[in-house]
Amino acid sequence: MKKIIALLLASLMMIVAAGCGGGDQAKSSGSGSGGNGKKITMGFSQIGAESEWRTANTESVKQAAKDAGIDLQFSDAQQKQENQIKAIRSFIAQGVDIIAFVPIVETGWDTVLKEAKDAKIPVIVVDRDVKLSDDSLYVAKIGTDSVTEGKNVFKWVDEYMTKQNKKPRDGGSQFNVVVLEGTVGSSVAIRRQEGFKDAMAASADASKYNILASQTGEFTRQKGQEVMESFLKSYGPKIDILFAHNDDMALGAIQAIEKAGLKPGKDITIISIDGVKGMFQAMIDGKSNCTVECNPLQGPLLMETAKKILNGETVEKLVYVDEGIFPADVAEKTLPERKY
């Protein structure tokens, strides 16, 4: 009888142990693991920290990885493509499960992404676009529609100038526009400019607008201020509209405009892209007129897409996040709701 009881107890302990093991397995195959139950390791290369928007983008990726239980190997390229290429090669050597990166510029990625493909490591392009000889070198692109953002800028400006019954400052027949462009060669700068020009060309009021000057401000506040100072020295009273490819450059330009004794948002109509809190405050203060949103909170969608890819699920090649347009008259109400 003692032997029978001992055998029953041993069997019961084995069943309990198996049940606990099953619980651990279920947990390990959850949000932070791939189809084989192993914890996912993602190599992520960010371009830098040039703006409020980029900081929010980085924080979104890091927090989303933490929430998903994904091991994030993070690299800051400090605005240098060669640093990103080194980082991607390092990720390949480490044998990460998946690579994601924000490309500083569009071109020059074929060789290193071919190395990732040969190593059977899937790649996700984030935020910006790439130009490749073979699009199979990346699985998906997550981000924003830069062309539409540029188009939305012109459409809003055209409607605003008409509704406000604005007149060219120099007494001429055209509104003169100066543009602060983003990083030279970056897809977002190329496409925002393309969208703006395409919308202008397609407009019935195209003849009312003239791009007086367009120069890179490198997506930074300091450079935006420097270039705007140069614009003001060269063109002064001819400038009616400033279009900045991002909010940080616009915020720098506002300082330059005030330094020149002008009223930003009044003497010069200002519109930019991103939708960061600093620009909402500038609109509340009457110093800017509109920001077209470029949503940096891409982390959750990135992690969700990465898990699907590693689980063998089919994903869309191109996935955009939701975005809006915010003129000055909604800034005060909207600012408390902003997450970046």
Image (cartoon, rainbow, N blue to C red):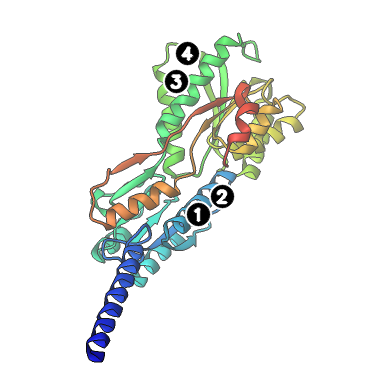
| Disc 2 and disc 4 in contact, CB within 8 angstroms | no
Q: Nearer the viewer, mark 2 or mark 3?
A: 2
Decide which of tag 2 and tag 4 comes sooner along the chain. 2
> Tag 1, which secondary structure?
helix
Residue at point 67% right, 31% down?
Answer: 282
Q: Residue furthest front?
A: 1
Q: Nearer the viewer, mark 1 or mark 4?
A: 1
Q: Amino acid at mark 4?
A: Ser
Question: For the residues marked 1 and 4, what is the alpha-carbon distance in whole angstroms?
Answer: 47 Å
Residue under numbered circle 4: 207
State the mark number for residue 63: 1
Q: Nearer the viewer, mark 2 or mark 1?
A: 1
Q: Amino acid at mark 3?
A: Met
Question: For the residues marked 2 and 4, what is the alpha-carbon distance in whole angstroms?
Answer: 39 Å
Decide which of tag 3 and tag 4 comes sooner along the chain. 3
State the mark number for residue 45: none
The N terminus, quarter of image: bottom left
Q: Amino acid at mark 2?
A: Thr
